[in-house]
Amino acid sequence: MVGSFVLEGPIRLSGSVKISGAKNAALPVLAAIPLVKGETVLHNVPRLEDVFTMIQILESLGISSRWDGNTLILKNNGLRTNEVPYELVRKMRASFNVLGPVTVSAGEARVPQPGGCAIGVRPVNFHIEALKTLGFDLEVNHGVVEAKIGRVSEGEVKTVSFPQPSVGATEHTMTTAAAMEGVEVTITNAAQEPEIVDLQNFLNMCGAKIEGAGTSTLLVKGVKTLSGCEYTIMNDRIEAGTYLIAGAATGGNVVVEDVEPEHLKALLDAFERAGVPHEVGDTWIRVIPGGEYRPIHLEVQPYPGFPTDLQPQITAMFSTVRGVSVIREHVFRNRFHHVPELNRMGASISVEDGTAVIEGVDKLLGAPVEATDLRAAAALVIAGLMAEGKTIISRIEHIFRGYENVLEKFRALGAQIDYLVDE
């Protein structure tokens, strides 16, 4: 549903917000379901557009689903097809991760290549090369990847080494290998995100034999069968970081609850260097009003570095921090589509070769702006809360892909936001 947010600012956010289940943990778990026989019960699943899309993909394969609050019950009694419709894959890149699981489950699969992405080129060649290393026969015909399981020998040892860490390719490879009986796979230069640890925990509860998640080397010993289990998805560190940045950017007093502070160590380090007052508990973090923030130089890196999914939001925050801040994006070098929109609101940000140079201005001014992707949408909401006057953010539907109950949560913190659905 296409629509706009209308915000009135400036506002100091105040209050507490409970963090939902992690989209980036739920999606790879759902992508594994074609391999998991019987009933799987997943708790703490966020009700988001991307999650709904992945469920549609599973249902197109013959897997049933039903909701009970934020619990999702899935039943896989055998796939009725090995093809995934393009109209579903095109909506979300994470859907490509069903290719390996469907191929292992059905012997072969046909999955369209995902489309382009607003935050930069994210080719699936790492995925394809990894699956070839596992013994898959792969061809791309008319934009569709056709995969077949090759002959696999008992006790075969394989090594998948990524040129650079890739979250999606790491998840795809470990999930696929988990159900390849008799094969032992070592994944090197693996991504280390907490969501990969969550996926390992889920798969192992289903009977997989995986170790090493959270480090750069994973060991997967393929088993014959994965069986359904009951599992609770981890909470969303990116959602938590977004509300913390919104609190800090507005000079507010905001507590995020149900969070693992260790997962946000890079953000808390940035807050420390910038002089953002904050407190940390066992399962909560609070930003506190006070003081003038300092500009910083920030390197956006794979985990445990500063997350690319929080870069647009913190760019908005530093747009009004006196002095010059520099943000270098090493994950998605083109992820700066939010910058022209922030500049429309009075920011002074220049971008060249993956680096944003931010000259802090006294204030932002409300303006009509356009959200180009999920995290850019979040950044523009933060900017609208900081800005003087009315901000209208069009194409705001992106934000519903990654933030559960976003309107209710921001309103509970004192934000004045209206949602207008386009006619």
Image: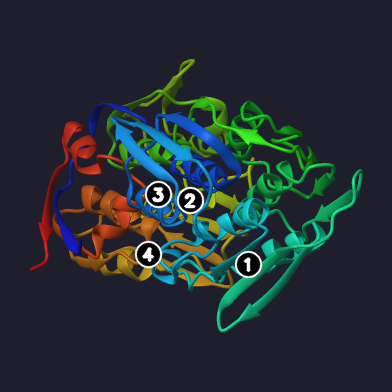
Give coordinates of residue 255: x percent, y percent.
Answer: 33, 25
Of tags 3 and 1, which is closer to the observer?
3
Badge 1 is on which residue? 124
Tag 1 and tag 4, C-beta contact below 8 Å: no
Question: Disc 3 or 1, which lies upstream in sequence?
Answer: 3
SS at badge 1 = loop
Q: Residue 309's mark?
A: 2
Compute the Cα span from label 3 to label 1. Answer: 21 Å
Compute the Cα span from label 2 to label 1. Answer: 19 Å
Badge 3 is on which residue? 55
Compute the Cα span from label 1 to label 4. Answer: 25 Å
Of tags 3 and 4, which is closer to the observer?
3
Amino acid type of disc 4? His
Of tags 2 and 4, which is closer to the observer?
2
SS at badge 4 = helix
Give coordinates of residue 303: x percent, y percent.
Answer: 63, 43
Residue 350 drawn above or below residue 73: below
